[in-house]
Image (cartoon, rainbow, N blue to C red):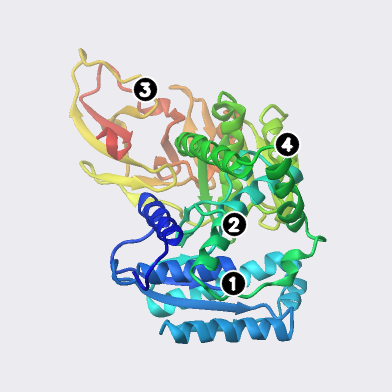
Amino acid sequence: MRFTMNRINERLLLKVEKYMLDNYMFQEGDKIVLGVSGGADSMSLLDIMLNFLEKYKLSLYVVHVNHGIRGLEADEDEQFVKDECDKYKVPCYTFKYDVEEYARDNKISSEEAGRELRYLSFRQIKDKVGASKIAVAHTSNDSAETILFNIIRGTGLTGIKGIMPVNGDIIRPILCMTCSEVYEYVEQGNLSYRTDITNFEEEYTRNKIRLNVLPYMEKNINSKVIEHIINLGELVRYTEDFMDRYAENIYSRVVLKKAFAESDEYLIDANLLKVEDPIIQQKVIRKVLYELIGRLKDITKVHIDSIIQLTDSQVGKKIELPYGVVCEKNYDYLSLYFSACKYKSFDDMGDLLYEEVQIGKEYYIDSIRKFISFELINYTPDMEIPKNDYTKWFDYDRIDGNLVLRTRKIGDVIKTREVGGTKKLKDLMIDMKIYRGMRDGIPVVAVDSNVLWLVGYRSSEGYKVSETTNRVLQMRVYSARDN
């Protein structure tokens, strides 16, 4: 240890050490960036990590962010952190911003602006020094405040999870400590710290919870209220993690992403989605929106519910969502895309797929994430012709020309009856109610403009296997795991 410990601090150090190890917060030899404001929480974090420095061969780098809000006091906080780091020979990096200006420019709250700039600074130094983790000084009180704050303003289960001990490269070593334990630690260890007076201004909801609501509940209702709120958050987190894993599996089954130069489009199989529990439907839709937009801010339960209601709506109905996103019902699919990115006609799309087929080879089709193989078989009448949608037999000797695996083109036709019955491929797709956003990605096997197989949907009647067939061309579509 860095210096002789009293029993209280030794107990708290052991508590934090166990918490960090249980949550796999670091490995021996790690470089860790510490966010240090100079307050009691962050000075406790710094002192605690210094105590583990030699034992775990850690390298520590302090980052202090001056928000430029509190004038001279903020500058004094910055100098205080520098002096403390000099005392313990810890590298210290400081940043100064005009948080209010940043908030105005980005149309966000001052609190949100401060958070964005802090983490921007932390990651800048993390990249500079090659660190693996960023440690911040949230306590269990902070987590309880967050849970109550989210409940009060309206939240789903995610908002009741509280603050995560580990979230990507962010670790929170003292999340197991209460605010009271932090002050015990600094007092018993004679640690200096700064006090931010804005933490005592009751105009902010969080401060009201911290200064009034939680203390009242602890004193007048249950002294273990924070512990119980944290336990609830942990239980919800375990439940959410399980449901997230399940929803991820459903997502892979019901969602198709189409990539275009301007943007992406996501297709959700409405029929498959509808059979899932409502909470799973919500999670799948939230994930689609996050993948498309890159954030979920301003996406509310009302938006999610509106999308779910579209699964039973008539074809062509649309709803507008934040960030210029549109959700549209198209036959059996919901399509989500940015309204500024209009559909391009398939003749403008270029060749999304084009392969001159060689018998005996297989090809990967990116749009459906599957392989297709072409195999020649000597046919006898006792053979059973496959009946599934992804294995088709064709009379090879009736094929006159070079086979091409591609996407649809203008002028494509397919024979729907052995005698006559030729139909434009575009008309067939409309008749089969194939959503327009999917049509350009469906593979086609053709000779010139004569389509043998619209893969997964319809094969031509012009190349049917009969009693006079000698050689069969088998086309089979499969995933890697099936082969």
Which mark lies nearer to you, 1 or 3?
A: 1
Which mark lies nearer to you, 4 or 2?
A: 2
Q: Is residue 334 above or below residue 420?
A: below
Q: CA separation, marks 3 and 2?
A: 64 Å
Q: How many marks?
A: 4
Q: Is residue 478 above or below residue 211?
A: above
Relative placement, left or right, of 377 versus 86 is left
The residue indicated by pointer 1 is 118
Relative placement, left or right, of 307 versus 468 is right
- Give the amino acid at mark 1: Arg
Please provide percent x and percent y for residue 434: 57, 34
Secondary element at tag 1: helix
Q: Residue furthest front?
A: 6
Q: Quadrant of the N terminus?
A: bottom left
Q: Is residue 108 above or below residue 288?
A: below
Q: Residue at x 32, y 41 (%)?
A: 371
Q: CA separation, marks 4 and 3?
A: 36 Å
- Give the amino acid at mark 3: Asn
The residue indicated by pointer 4 is 306
Residue 133 vs residue 444, the one in the foreground: 133
Mark 4 touches mark 2? (CB < 8 Å): no
What mark, if any, has residue 388 been given in the picture? 3
Mark 2 touches mark 1? (CB < 8 Å): no
Please provide percent x and percent y for residue 169: 44, 62
